[in-house]
């Protein structure tokens, strides 16, 4: 494989740094960002997950502050991805997000988060069925912020209405949903039915989505409609052990699968983009196809957001 650059739209942390921690030091963030750049990562969206509006706001403010303080952090973190809190609270769909903080979308809560990020918000993941009349979706789209569905279970009609309101992406297809669903009428099939109108994100660690299923999703949706993320947490780049994501304990096993403490569900990933590329090679993709998934398409999405 030739050397590649990467753009990752979903990074919760790296190299011991948790972007969702309540405290942090800029020098540690610099080390994590430098390590990512050394691995060939050109740009990321630092991802802040569901919590109270107050806690999420504080984390968004910290990201902005560290970008102001450090040219290294600012070079890599080109924006933020707000994943939550407007997610489906039902088991399976909520995934690793704290269910007690899931809520119905409102313009006032969204504005508080946008204000805290101080212009850095590039992408918001929400559940369309949690956005009454799609007011938040349409409001974000008018501001040039990409809106992605995720951790959700909208009907096909709701999904189509959300796209009409400005929804453009889907977050980590095949995850953020129950292990067992209706064989046909499920969120995965609905999204694939709309692939001509959505850009579909996929976690490429080989754990969240088995490689044979990843190949099927790419073939069905079309590589040109997909992009690959790591969904990395603080464990990424470090290996097996026990780590933190927000206020949760995460256990990374020898296969780099990242589990909740009770092993009930996956919680982010511990892979690097280089490991993800190795997986894409394993499923038979050509270098040009891989570059499209890990660099060209996510880069174009960032350019759409005027980064």
Image (cartoon, rainbow, N blue to C red):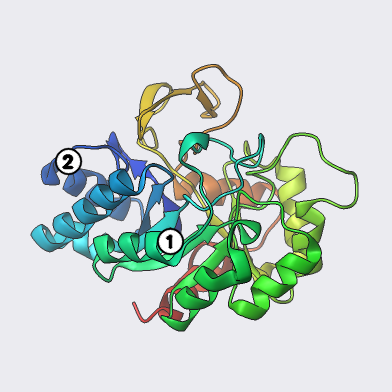
Q: For this view, does 24 lie left or right of residue 191? A: left
On residue 25, which mark appears? none
Decide if residue 221 is in sight here.
yes
Quarter holding the C terminus is: bottom left
Q: Residues within 10 Å of mark 2 (few under 14, many from 20)?
A: some
- Helix, strand, or loop for circle 1? strand
Instruction: Tell me residue 277's x, y (percent).
Output: 54, 51
Q: For this view, does 256 lie left or right of residue 92? A: left
Q: For this view, does 47 lie left or right of residue 90? A: left
Asked whether 120 or 275 is in front, the reply is: 120
Which mark sits nearer the N-terminus, 2 or 1? 1
Q: Residue at x 67, y 42 (%)?
A: 209
Instruction: Tell me residue 211's x, y (percent).
Output: 70, 43
Q: In this picture, is 198 found above or below 10?
A: below
Instruction: Tell me residue 27's x, y (percent).
Output: 12, 44
On residue 28, which mark appears? 2
Q: In this picture, is 32 found above or below 160?
A: above
Instruction: Tell me residue 114's x, y (percent).
Output: 32, 65
How far is mark 2 from mark 1, CA to CA? 22 Å
Quadrant of residue 126 within the rendered picture: bottom right
Asked whether 51 or 82 is in front, the reply is: 51
Q: For this view, does 293 lie left or right of residue 30? A: right
Q: Which residue is mark 1?
A: 6
Quadrant of residue 270 within the rendered picture: top left
Number of numbered discs present? Answer: 2
Viewer-nearest of labels 2 and 1? Answer: 2
Q: Residue at x 23, y 51 (%)?
A: 34
Decide if residue 44 is in sight here.
no
């Amino acid at each position: 494989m030739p050397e590649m650059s990467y753009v990752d739209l979903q990074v919760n942390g790296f190299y011991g740094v948790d972007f969702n921690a309540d405290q942090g030091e800029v020098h540690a963030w610099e080390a994590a960002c430098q390590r990512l750049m050394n691995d060939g990562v050109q740009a990321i969206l630092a991802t802040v997950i569901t919590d109270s509006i107050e806690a999420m706001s504080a984390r968004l403010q910290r990201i902005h502050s560290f970008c102001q303080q450090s040219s290294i952090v600012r070079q890599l973190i080109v924006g933020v991805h707000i994943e939550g809190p407007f997610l489906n609270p039902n088991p399976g769909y909520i995934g690793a997000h704290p269910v007690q903080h899931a809520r119905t979308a409102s313009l006032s809560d969204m504005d508080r988060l946008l204000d805290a990020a101080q212009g850095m918000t590039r992408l918001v993941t929400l559940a369309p069925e949690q956005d009454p009349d799609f007011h938040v979706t349409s409001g974000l789209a008018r501001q040039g912020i990409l809106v992605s569905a995720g951790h959700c279970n909208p009907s096909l009609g709701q999904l189509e209405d959300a796209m009409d309101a400005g929804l453009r992406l889907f977050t980590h297809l095949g995850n953020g949903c129950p292990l067992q669903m209706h064989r046909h009428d499920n969120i995965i099939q609905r999204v694939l039915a709309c692939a001509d109108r959505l850009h579909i994100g996929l976690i490429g660690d080989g754990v969240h989505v088995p490689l044979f299923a990843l190949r099927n999703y790419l073939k069905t949706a079309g590589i040109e409609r997909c992009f690959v993320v790591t969904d990395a947490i603080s464990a990424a780049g470090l290996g097996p052990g026990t780590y933190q994501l927000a206020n949760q304990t995460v256990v990374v096993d020898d296969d780099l699968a990242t589990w909740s403490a009770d092993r009930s569900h996956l919680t982010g990933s511990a892979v690097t983009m280089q490991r993800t590329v190795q997986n894409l090679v394993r499923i038979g993709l050509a270098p040009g196809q891989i570059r499209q998934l890990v660099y060209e398409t996510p880069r174009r999405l960032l350019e759409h957001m005027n980064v």
